[in-house]
């Protein structure tokens, strides 16, 4: 899976760019710190001034150790192409609490289908929220297991029209400035980021207001400059994050919730 250097934000007067690694994309962060460029060849983009620092959140509950095994179907990325329901929900159990994401396939069919397949096979289980930029975005989507990351490194999906604005709570795939570079990394908007719309970031689902209370608590005191390296996360997995950034919150499990069709009366 290609790594996307978290969003790269442009100067206050310029166009917003997501600061992602050359391989994977991320939304551009509004903070003054510059996001790390995903690929060594990609220069770091300047990010807008961040919102006032938030008080440090209480220590998160230690995440359970990743399972020794994982769904081996994830090792064959090209075969996971099931069509998602028109609307479905995913429950995230995290180290801060639970929240539910509602996905609308008509917002971004390609992105919704990819997310459906990833969740169905528990791709995100044990993955960390490795980039949290106060007042901007929360990013996740690099597997806790190196073999899975390797299997999805080149499994990109095509871009698609932006039909919804990047509002607070909306989920969108991270990507680089190159076309068709969305893969598995996703960010949750912490505020209305309409500037990302014209950059091609297509929301496909949303967390409700109650769930955002949990998202707002994710640990956010590691700065952009001192945060983890996405390539190393992919190569070394969760132990790399647990050793260098132990306070990061993570996903315990994701559960697919598809409502059964009502039977005719």
Image: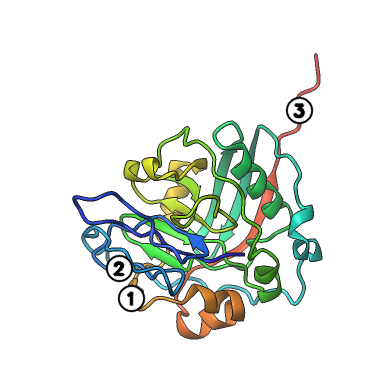
**For the point 68% across and 54% down, which residue is it?**
118
Rate crowding at label 1 as few (under 14), some (14 to 19) or many (20 or more) other CA atoms within 10 Å.
Answer: few
Q: Which residue is mark 2?
A: 34
**For the point 31% across and 69% down, which residue is it?**
56
Numbered disc 3: secondary structure: loop
**For the point 62% across and 68% down, which residue is it?**
143
* Coordinates of residue 157 in the picture (x, y in percent): 62, 50
Residue 192 in sight: no
Nearest to viewer (mark 1 / mark 3): 1
Q: Which residue is mark 3?
A: 261
Residue 179 in sight: yes
Give the spatial CA distance, label 1 vs label 3: 48 Å
Give the spatial CA distance, label 2 vs label 1: 7 Å
Q: Is residue 193 left or right of residue 3?
A: left
Which residue is most to the bottom? Answer: 243
Numbered disc 2: secondary structure: loop
* Coordinates of residue 71 in the picture (x, y in percent): 78, 64
Q: Which residue is mark 1?
A: 225
Numbered disc 1: secondary structure: loop
Considering only order in the chain, which callout, 1 or 2, is on the residue closer to the N terminus? 2
Q: Are marks 2 and 3 in contact (CB under 8 Å)?
A: no
Splitting the image into 4 quarters, where does residue 148 fall? bottom right
Considering only order in the chain, which callout, 3 or 1, is on the residue closer to the N terminus? 1
Q: Are marks 2 and 1 in contact (CB under 8 Å)?
A: yes
Splitting the image into 4 quarters, where does residue 94 fall? bottom right
Using the image, tell me which numbered label, if any, was put on residue 216: none
Give the spatial CA distance, label 2 vs label 3: 47 Å
Q: Is residue 232 above or below residue 26?
A: below
Pick whichever, 244 or 163, lies toward us: 163
User: Quick one: quadrant of the C terminus?
Assistant: top right
Q: Is residue 190 above or below residue 40?
A: above
């Amino acid at each position: 899976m290609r790594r996307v250097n978290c969003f790269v934000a442009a100067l206050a007067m310029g166009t917003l760019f997501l600061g992602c690694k050359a391989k994977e994309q991320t939304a551009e962060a509004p903070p003054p710190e510059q996001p790390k460029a995903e690929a060594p060849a990609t220069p770091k983009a300047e990010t807008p001034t961040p919102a006032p620092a938030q008080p440090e959140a209480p220590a998160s509950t230690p995440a359970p150790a990743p399972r020794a095994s994982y769904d081996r179907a994830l090792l064959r990325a090209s075969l996971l192409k099931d069509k998602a329901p028109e609307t479905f929900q995913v429950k995230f159990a995290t180290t801060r609490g639970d929240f539910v994401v509602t996905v609308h396939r008509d917002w971004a069919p390609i992105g919704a289908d990819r997310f459906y397949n990833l969740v169905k096979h528990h791709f995100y289980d044990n993955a960390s929220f490795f980039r949290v930029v106060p007042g901007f975005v929360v990013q996740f989507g690099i597997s806790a297991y190196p073999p899975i990351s390797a299997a999805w490194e080149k499994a990109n999906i095509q871009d698609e029209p932006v039909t919804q604005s990047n509002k607070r709570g909306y989920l969108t795939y991270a990507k680089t400035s190159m076309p068709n570079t969305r893969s598995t990394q996703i960010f949750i908007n912490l505020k209305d980021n309409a500037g990302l719309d014209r950059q091609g970031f297509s929301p496909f689902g949303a967390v409700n207001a109650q769930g955002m209370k949990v998202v707002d608590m994710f640990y956010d005191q590691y700065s952009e400059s001192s945060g983890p390296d996405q390539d190393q996360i992919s190569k070394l997995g969760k132990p790399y994050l647990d050793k260098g950034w132990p306070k990061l919150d993570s996903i315990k499990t994701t559960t697919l919730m598809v409502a059964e069709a009502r039977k005719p009366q």
